[in-house]
Amino acid sequence: MNASAAETRPAAPPAAMGGVIAYLTVDGAVAAAEFYARAFGAVEIGRQPVDAKGRTMHIHLAFNGTSLMLSDGFPEHGHPALPPQGFTMIIPATDIDKQFDRAVKAGATVLQPVQTMFWGDRYGALRDPFGVTWGMNQPG
């Protein structure tokens, strides 16, 4: 391969972390990424540029030792943003009270306050401004 061909090849995307990676489609992926940084300490690894409507097809975040992928809906391509339902994102916590409070202060809504559960762990649940439910669990 000549040097000019190598110069035009896009850089390889960063490797994803984790054995299973959640890919959320939300209405406002850029705003969601900013919220996840404030609420959970997520760090942005990469992002595709936004289109003329302010949507992005891909954002890669890292936090709590794993990757989280986001995109806006693109209904014209058969990929609408639908209200999240039927799943909860779980964050294993090491300091659940502090982590939970950070998410609430960032704008998450408390669904279940942190408490010691019947299985012995401390657990609490939140809903983010994009409709995604998050549970935090700290072993007892």
Image: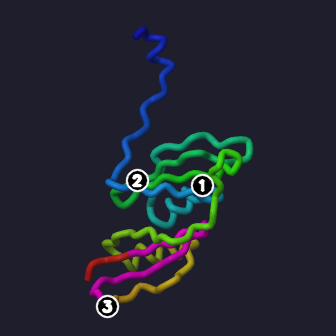
Instruction: Name the element at disc 1.
Output: helix
Question: Which amino acid, by three-letter code, is at mark 1?
Answer: Ala
Q: Disc 3 marks which residue?
A: 118
Expressed as whole percent of the image width and height from the top left, the position of residue 139 reads 27, 78
SS category of the residue bearing label 3:
loop
Residue hosting label 2? 67
Residue 104: % across, % down: 52, 76
The residue beneath circle 1 is 29
Q: Position of residue 98 (x, y in %)?
A: 40, 76
In front here: 90 or 42?
90
Give above or below for 77 relative to 98.
above
CA neighbours of label 1 inside 10 A, class few (<14), some (14 to 19), many (20+): many
Say whether residue 56 is left or right of residue 9. Answer: right
| Numbered tag placed on residue 85 in the rendering | none
Amino acid at dot 2: Ser
Q: CA distance from mark 3 to mark 1?
A: 36 Å
Disc 3 crowd rating (10 Å Cα; few below 14, some 14-19, many 20+) is: few
Q: Are marks 3 and 1 in contact (CB under 8 Å)?
A: no
With respect to residue 6, does 55 lie above or below?
below
x, y percent for residue 122: 34, 83
Q: CA distance from mark 1 to mark 2?
A: 15 Å
Q: Decide: marks 2, 3 in contact (CB < 8 A)?
A: no
Q: Residue furthest top?
A: 2
